[in-house]
Amino acid sequence: MNNMPTECLIIGGGTSILPYISSLQPLCANKFTVLTNYAFKTFLGTFLCFNDRDFYKPRPNNKGVFENPDYYDELKELPLIVGINQNGVEEFKLDNTILLDRKEKEDLTGVLSLKLALRLMQTGTVYLLGFDWTRRKGLPERDPNYNPKSNTPTHYYNNINHRGVGLLGYYENHNADRLFDKLIKKDTIKIYNVSPESNIDCFEKIDYERMFSLLSNEIIDQDCVRNQIRSKLCIV
């Protein structure tokens, strides 16, 4: 029997979250919440989702430089992590981590996190937070591999120096709706993009005031939900 919650918050990294962090923190701790990448530094959640091995266990690049901070010891303290088994990450797999087959890989952790939420839920509502798809407008078409550093704020955790800081090339050269639209398969699950200025247009957009009015007062048993997640996902 599926007893998964019918409300899910997914925490992306976009700057639109910044004004609402203090309001979101107690919600995330008490709701079915999927954290992506460095969101675990700000919020408590049901599980942390990652797509990139170098987020989990950083390696130096070909110049011997580490482009991501090493939070491996902090990740050990989290209750549950779900990521992709690729690039040798299995060698460093922690007891709290579920590794999915590489075929589950997505280009972006945000896409992967939504795919997992939809797999776990049967019905209900998903709220995407910080899914801004930040890009500079009015730019001419150019090589998709063009990915220079920008001064445009890209993440709400701008104090964490990781290799994605300031990089807008992917967002400027990929169609967000083509990536996310393929996930809209269950008409029993409503997906809201809680970022009215987001460049992801395939989901209905609402503001935070509207989301807070829609959310129920239900507080979930996080340990119970995590056990259900472990039983539903294939562990490598």
Image (cartoon, grey):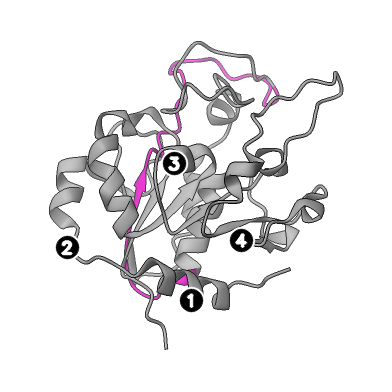
Q: Identify residue type, mark 4.
A: Asn
Q: Can the viewer see residue 191?
A: no
Kindly identify which numbered label has been placed on residue 217.
2
| C-alpha distance separating marks 2 and 4 | 29 Å
Q: Secondary structure at mark 4?
A: loop
Q: Residue furthest top?
A: 151
Task: Say if the magenta span includes residue 127.
Answer: yes
Comparing marks 2 and 4, which lies closer to the viewer?
Answer: 4
| C-alpha distance separating marks 1 and 4 | 14 Å
Q: Could you say where residue 156 lies in the image, as x and y percent from the top left?
A: 41, 28
Q: Within the image, what quadrant is residue 2 found in? A: bottom left
Seen in the image, is 179 located left or right of residue 199? right
| C-alpha distance separating marks 2 and 1 | 21 Å
Seen in the image, is 80 located left or right of residue 125? right
Q: Which comes before the other along the chain, label 1 or label 4?
A: 4
Q: Which comes before the other along the chain, label 3 or label 4?
A: 3
Residue receiving disc 4: 96
Q: Could you say where residue 119 lies in the image, as x and y percent from the top left?
A: 50, 69
Residue positioned 56% across, 22% down in the render: 165
Circles 3 and 1, Cβ within 8 Å, touching? The answer is: no
Q: Nearer the viewer, residue 205 or 25?
A: 25
Kindly identify which numbered label has been placed on residue 12.
3
Q: Secondary structure at mark 1?
A: helix
Q: Could you say where residue 87 lies in the image, as x and y percent from the top left?
A: 81, 47
Residue receiving disc 1: 228
| C-alpha distance separating marks 3 and 1 | 23 Å
Quarter placement of the C terminus: bottom right
Residue positioned 61% across, 61% down in the render: 96
